[in-house]
Image (cartoon, grey):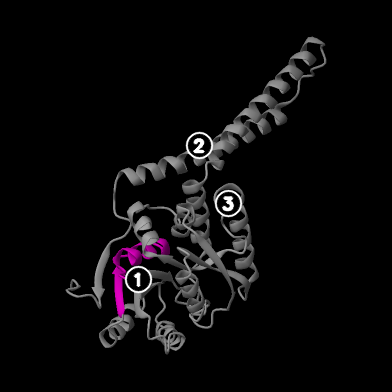
Amino acid sequence: MKLSLIIPVLNEEENVPHLVKAVDEAFAGQTEVELEMLFVDDGSRDGTFDVLGRLAAADPRLRVIRFSRNFGSHAALLAGFEKCSGDVAAYLAADLQDPPAMLLTMLQKWREGAFVVWGTREQRDDPFSARLFSLVYSTLMQRFALRNMPRTGLDLCMIDRKVIEAVVEMREKNTSIFGLILWAGFPQVFVPYHRQARKRGKSRWTLGKKIKLVVDSFVSFSFFPIRLVTYLGFGLSFLGFLYGLFVMVRALLGLTPVQGWASLVTIVVFLSGVQLLMLGIVAEYLWRTFDETRRRPPFLIRELAGFAGEPKP
């Protein structure tokens, strides 16, 4: 049985050797498991690729994909799924916040027949802002997009070869790979674990990337934003009609004084803001449709290491 570990990295020069060591310790004595570690360098600007290249030259289990620039962790996951050769593949973060030993428990669940095994955060040592974002994101996704999204959020993931092929065949851009796996609907189980604090380096999971994930996830898996535009339009139109009747009745009764400039400007500015918001939501859907029709690849590979016949830089 062959297990492929997909590990996106971005400026993780310091963590990579410790991660490889932790994986070796977790799988020590697991002679029935053939291990493949596939690192995807998502545009690192430090010495991450050099470190990975040296490790791959010394360890035949390591494969390294280097992107031409930063395409995002979900594009890195897709590249890993395309290139991996295992019967089952697992996503593992490079920051060592998710213990590699958890993979053994998840592997057992896969052997028992689960096509998808999720590691769900029962407890986490992350900052409050990270925990709050995760809770809000998971709650909204579960309520308005993917009903099978756990409230505690997702980090670790292990999927069967059939699921790998299904995700690769979709080959979507501007989406969430985890969302695609949930949407696919294969039998899945959840394994709780304790997510630890980052010990080395700085997290690259910035606020901008978090906002992009939220927008991509909702646009890809939910019609709620576009439906909200429709409801908002109906609601504002109805309120405008009622206010128009109110103004007309007051005018007929001679109760309308010569005033109202401030309220008129306020209403115009408010409605203009709402219209721009509606256009922005529609534009998000249109942009992603346009981006898919151009058929540009979701990532570009600059070079490979550890693969037979890899292209030279």
Q: Report, in whole angstroms, how far the alpha carbon at label 2 lies from the one at label 1.
A: 37 Å
Marks 3 and 1 sit apart, C-alpha to C-alpha, by: 30 Å
Residue ID at (31%, 81%): 61
Q: Position of residue 304 (x, y in %)?
A: 25, 73
Q: Nearer the viewer, mark 3 or mark 1?
A: 3
Residue assigned mark 1: 40
Q: Which residues are magenta?
A: 62-86
Tell me what residue is drawn at x 46 percent, y 69 percent: 110
Q: How many marks?
A: 3
- Closer to the camera, 2 or 80? 2
- Report the disc number at residue 133: none
- Real-space CA distance between mark 2 and mark 3, rounded to the nearest whole angstrom: 27 Å
For marks 3 and 1, the one nearer the N-term is 1
Toward the viewer: 253 or 2?
Answer: 2
Specify which label sits upstream in the sequence, 2 or 3. 3
Earlier along the polypeptide chain: callout 2 or callout 1? Answer: 1
